[in-house]
Image (spheres, helix red, strand yellow):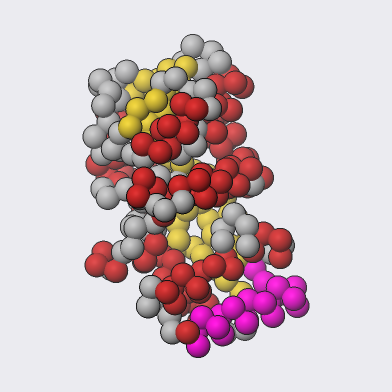
Amino acid sequence: MADRYVPHAFSDIDSHPDPARLVAALNRLSAHPFFAAYRQRAGELLGARRGSRLLEVGAGTGEAARRLAAQTGAEITVCDLSAVMCGEMRGCGLTRVAVADAGQLPFRDRIFDGVWADRVLQHVSDPERALAEMVRVVRPGGRIVVCDPDTGTQALELADQRLAARVLELRRTVNIRHGTFARRTPGLLAGHGLADVRVEARTLVIRDAREVGGAMGIRDWAEVYARRGYLSRPEADRFNALLGEAIESGRFLFAVTYFLTSGTV
């Protein structure tokens, strides 16, 4: 399916016509209770504490890094492939900021006490290389934490399950380079020799009508695929009508499972 891949908006933010809109979208995601909760847990798994040196790969707006530093006193470096995002992070007070490719981190071997990446490896061109780079820059005894959704676990309740399945498959194959990489992460970390590799599964469930147009942008899915030629106009219109009916009747449900994987170098 690699030939069908269309870069996710967050993969190409520097050339986006309205980067401020993407920054706002990331901030909305950060504020969602589901994401805030597992980010809190990620900090615990990292063993973040005063004086520890940590790195966030693909830090986006830097909100998680700022929060973790304020809560623990850890010294946090952030990096992102986007110069726009790095500028956003500097503007919000972060000082250890680097524009960097996750597959070629500009840091010495074994320099950090812990490294984490949140919803990043699913989008990078070579997630195995990025994971190896994360391992390289962590000292022995240090921690690695990775979180990504497994798009193979998606569920969507609409009256037409064939159309629902088609849209979910488009989400898995068109927008995200490596939608099922999350399930491979534990084995790859074990292959790098990490100890105590553990996985915590957390499922995002959306039923509230107010969230349908919010963090996950569900109301926009069919329109996006119709514009790109993956759905016909009648199919997109039918999806939108069924979505409205499901919301109105209270039957709507969308769910996807995130894997929070950690290990010790």
**Residue at image location 55% in from the left, 33% down from the top:** 63
* Residue at the extreme front of the image, as rendered: 17
**Residue at image location 67% in from the left, 59% down from the top:** 211
Which stretch is magenta? 234-253
Pick the front one: 224 or 68: 224
Check residue 194 for magenta coloring: no
**Residue at image location 56% in from the left, 46% down from the top:** 24
Q: Is residue 103 above or below residue 45?
A: below
- Report x, y in % for residue 149: 47, 53
Q: Is residue 79 left or right of residue 167?
A: left
Pick the front one: 37 or 12: 12
Pick the front one: 152 or 140: 152
On-image quarter of the N terminus: bottom left
On-image quarter of the C terminus: top left
**Residue at image location 26% in from the left, 64% down from the top:** 2
- Report x, y in % for residue 220: 54, 67
Check residue 243 for magenta coloring: yes
Looking at the magenta stretch, what is its main secondary structure? helix
Where, by quadrant of the figure, is residue 100 drawn? top left
- Report x, y in % for residue 11: 36, 50
